[in-house]
Image (cartoon, helix red, strand yellow):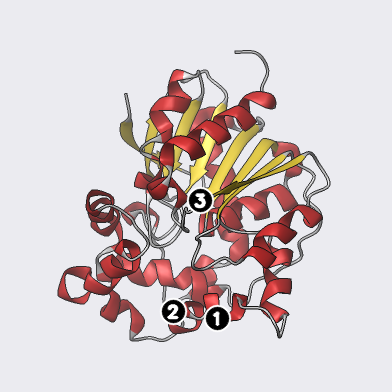
Amino acid sequence: MVETIGLMTRSGLTFTADVEGPTNGPLVLLLHGFPESRHSWRAALPVLGKAGYRCVAPDQRGYSAGARPDPADLSNYAFDKLVNDALEIAAAAGYEGKRFHLVGHDWGGQVSWGVANAHPERLASLTVLSRPHPLAFHRALQRPDGDQKHRSRHHTRFLEPETGPLLIEDNARRLREGLFGQNVEQAAIDEHVAVLGNRDGIEAALAWYRSNKGLSGDFGPIEVPTLYIWGDADATVGPDAARGTGEFVTAAYGMEVLPGVGHFVMDNAPARATELMLAHIRKYSSPL
């Protein structure tokens, strides 16, 4: 049964997290993207937990009220701190120094690539939904004949100071429309807006973009067994970036394309995505 707890890390932040599965099972850490929340993983947690895994799905830095340093100081949302949060959350969940399975979507996927890049020895497997490898994404953005720059045009708007208030005014109408326009059900939108649809939450979430403009970073080849899941109806990630991701993974790599599925994979095709990630995680787990 899914339980919501607070996890205090050694940095003094308390992350709201949904947890499921045996406390002594192998850890699966699941990181959400923007503009979603820990609720992205509502379908995956019971399945992974039943399979014997300890699942931890936190609201990330800025999304958790207890882990929301001042977004006016953009250094609070620097990429290295987002990556370090993942390791500290794993430690707070009882897995200090142990290898774990990491799953990330969108910005959570970017953080997951960062963890795999900087700390490959900590990961048993990596599963990323939607977000391409940062170097594949950067390359696609630079192509003059490509469409990734157009698909990512919303990133520029997120840098503008008036964006936060606009997104949450009128009961977060624009935030809701951005999700609903990509076939996310109303009940799921309500869950995400309950986390993000307030001034403090939205400004902290936007600080991720403002602190990490044009992020490609010092990424190299990924040396962790990786599964990349992409929906071919994704409005924000095009085929160039998606299909180029495998060039930057030197470990075992698999790509699964979900026909007709948009950017919000866990809200559009939760059963299929969960099936795929579980199969990948099992492949790189000791027998349970």
Foreground: 239 or 160? 239
Find numbered disc 3 in the image and state the secondary structure of the residue it sits on. loop
Q: Which amino acid does label 1 sit on?
A: His
Q: Residue 24's x, y, as percent?
A: 52, 18
Up/down of 283 relative to 109, above or below: above
Up/down of 91 relative to 80, above or below: above
Residue located at (49% from left, 67% from top) = 235
Residue located at (57% from left, 24% from top) = 26
Between disc 3 and disc 2, whose residue precedes? 3
Mark 3 or 2: in front is 2
Mark 2 or 1: in front is 1
Q: Which residue position is annotated with label 2?
A: 158
Q: What residue type is labelled 2?
A: Phe
Residue located at (34% from left, 45% from top) = 39
Foreground: 120 or 133? 133
Q: Which residue position is annotated with label 3?
A: 11
Q: Which residue position is annotated with label 1?
A: 150
Which quarter of the figure has residue 252? top right
**Does residue 35 appear left or right of residue 27 in this picture?**
left
Between disc 1 and disc 3, whose residue precedes? 3
Whether residue 40 is visible: yes
Q: Residue furthest front?
A: 259
Up/down of 211 relative to 14, above or below: below
Which quarter of the figure has residue 183? bottom left
Q: How crowded is mark 2: few (under 14 residues within 10 Å), some or many (20 or more)?
A: some
Q: Residue 101's x, y, as percent?
A: 61, 34
Foreground: 218 or 242? 242
Find numbered disc 1 in the image and state the secondary structure of the residue it sits on. helix
Q: How far apart are marks 1 and 3 (CA)?
A: 38 Å
Which quarter of the figure has residue 160? bottom left
